Amino acid sequence: MESFLAACIVAGTPLLFATVGEIITERAGCMNLGVEGMMLMGAVMGFVGALSTANPWIAVLCAVLAGTAGALIYAVLTVSLRANQVVTGLTLTIFGTGFASFVGQPMLGNMAPQEVIAFFAKTPIPGLSSIPVIGPIFFKQDVFVYFGYLVFILAAVYIYKTRMGLNLRAVGENTAAADASGININLYKYVHILVGGALCGLGGAYLSLVRVPIWQSDVVSGRGWIAVALVIFASWNPVKAFFGAVLFGGLSILGLRLQAMGFNVSQYLVDMIPYVATILIVIISTRKKSKESQPPGDLGNSYFREDR
Amino acid sequence: MNLIRISKRDDLPKKKEIVIRILAILLSILFSGVIIMMFGLNPAEIFRSIIEGAVGTPTRIRQTILTAVPLTITSLGIIVAFKMKFWNIGAEGQITMGALGATVIALFLPESVPAPLKLLLMLLASMLFGGVWAFIPAIFKAKMGTNETIFTLMLNYIAIKFVTYLQYGPWKDPNSGGFPRIAYYPDNALLPSLFGVHIGWIIAIICVAFVYLFINYTKKGYEITVVGESLETARYAGMNISQIIVTAMFISGGMCGVVGMIQAAGIEKTLVAPIANNYGFTAIITAWLSRLNAVACLFVCIAFAMLTQGGAYIQIALGVPSAVASVVQGTVLFFVLGSEFFLQYRVSLARRAAQAKKEVA
């Protein structure tokens, strides 16, 4: 059971990065449906970085830059040029998918260098990892997972406990009011869209460098979209996003576990569970009418001062 | 800070609009060229080979048409949904389910049924299956306001996983020598050809005419447009919004379902899990590029089919990944999305604007 829960966290980590990234983006009132594309861009560029330098830091940096570059396209189009957010995000996903299979084609089936794989091997945290139950689940993981813990906690503190986080929430909730109170709307939107993209890139890199360190063009296979749904599940709260990501990570590996335990179930039917669960979550969260579970008020709207 | 002044345009001469659009497309091609160059390839050669691969020989032209057919019909289905601002990104799943519906008829109806009747039944089954697959998210959207983007997208995965399950499990052909595939269609379930291309192209042209007339000249089509423009207006005018959403989505999914039947009975000759072949996503680009206009959509889809076929050709001829085509497609849409800003707003340098003001004064 402990090993299963530890595996759930591993499976949930790419979802966690992407979900927190999208939460930060949506808090600024921007719905970026390009998560899948940005993850793929991060995954492929991270892998390129790893192959060409064998340095894990540079690999991760490449992934971050790739995710940010994708987000920059989105930001220029939706914030500066006020393009439709839904269509722009979808295009980013299509573009990212094409970009990843284009760039990745020559490296299909290649393995990440040993140095990188070794760097991301399990490294138990001394002390913490010897706590019974909790230790083996949470603290016998790779460094990427630990960074994930840090990211979601920092994101939660930032959004709920800092002045800038308050401003961010104001931008997403009521852009016009935030503008009137002197907040630099475009700056806030740009920064948070870019940070969101960087985190999506990291999520992609986790898949291509750590999870299965062999390049395959369908590494992300819909996880970006699950992350978009998890944002709703988590009601725009990074802490809830962690639990959602682990839960969904668990669902995605359930099939193999059940088969290993001798249950005769079709892998393809079990594979459907995360997608069915996502739909159920979207339905349930639209039924909930509590105040905190509502999306940011100005989510999806372009803002033009003169339109007020 | 305020060097650039942005103001809303009231009206834009048609000529200027066309110039901006053409400029956007030219820029996007230039920009894709730069991307291609960054990978050490010669963009001029790539673009020339793409065109050569798309229309160089009669066979290639036929191949391009075979790609344009599913793309056009899917885009038309998406147009019906997008007109209503219902973000149907579930075309992949609707195509897959449509193919499943057609396959049920093709494989399980006795061989003695005459071909025309069988094909007609397959067509209806594919519409029904695709339509129902779009109806499910539509009814939730209409009754509860559930987010359709994620709902339709998740249904894609579910449909594809389900067909994979059939392909590897209960429907696996016992005569395939262990290879996991569904049995081939009998001859009377295959699409006949006309002028060397299966009759899907006739269906595509009928669909263009249907969507054009439906959106522009029918009451339902008008209602869909109103719901898309402003829910408030629709409500105020006493329209039955739920019913409009559900009907439009059934039509949208039904058309995508037909694509599944065309691909299964015309190309694959059976049902395979990746039957939708990303048409559902590419069609989102083409639908938007054609500004949700059914006639324009036909031409955009032909252009995109050329890009896709040309991309496949350069992979074989030059060893360049065919994904170059989807990079170009994405880039084109980015530029067109960006150009729409310049259609709606006037951008001028602040100093010049101030000067203009002074002159007026």
Image: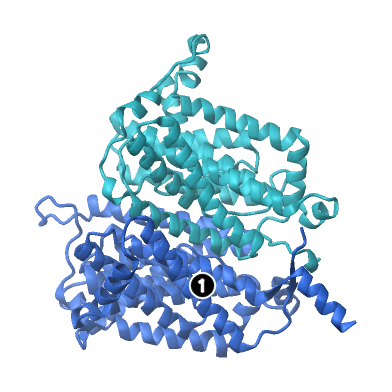
Chain colours: A cyan, B blue
Q: Name the residue located 45 percent from the left edge and 41 percent from the top edge.
A: A62
Q: Name the residue located 47 percent from the left edge and 47 percent from the top edge.
A: A66
For residue B284, say whether it is visible. Answer: no
Who is closer to the viewer here, B34 or B162? B34
Q: Name the residue located 57 percent from the left edge and 50 percent from the top edge.
A: A282
Picture coordinates of residue B9, whole percent (x, y): 72, 78
Who is closer to the viewer here, A167 or B270? A167
Dot 1 amino acid type: Trp
Image quadrant in which the N terminus of chain A is located: top left
> Would residue A95 be found to the left or right of residue A302 on screen?
left
For residue A198, say whether it is visible. Answer: yes
Who is closer to the viewer here, A188 or A200? A188
Picture coordinates of residue B356, whole percent (x, y): 81, 79
> Would residue B176 be found to the left or right of residue B247 on screen?
left
Picture coordinates of residue A182, whole percent (x, y): 83, 50
> Would residue B360 be found to the left or right of residue B328 on screen?
right
Q: Name the residue located 29 percent from the left edge and 29 percent from the top edge.
A: A260
User: What residue does disc 1 label?
Assistant: B288
Picture coordinates of residue B102, whole percent (x, y): 30, 70
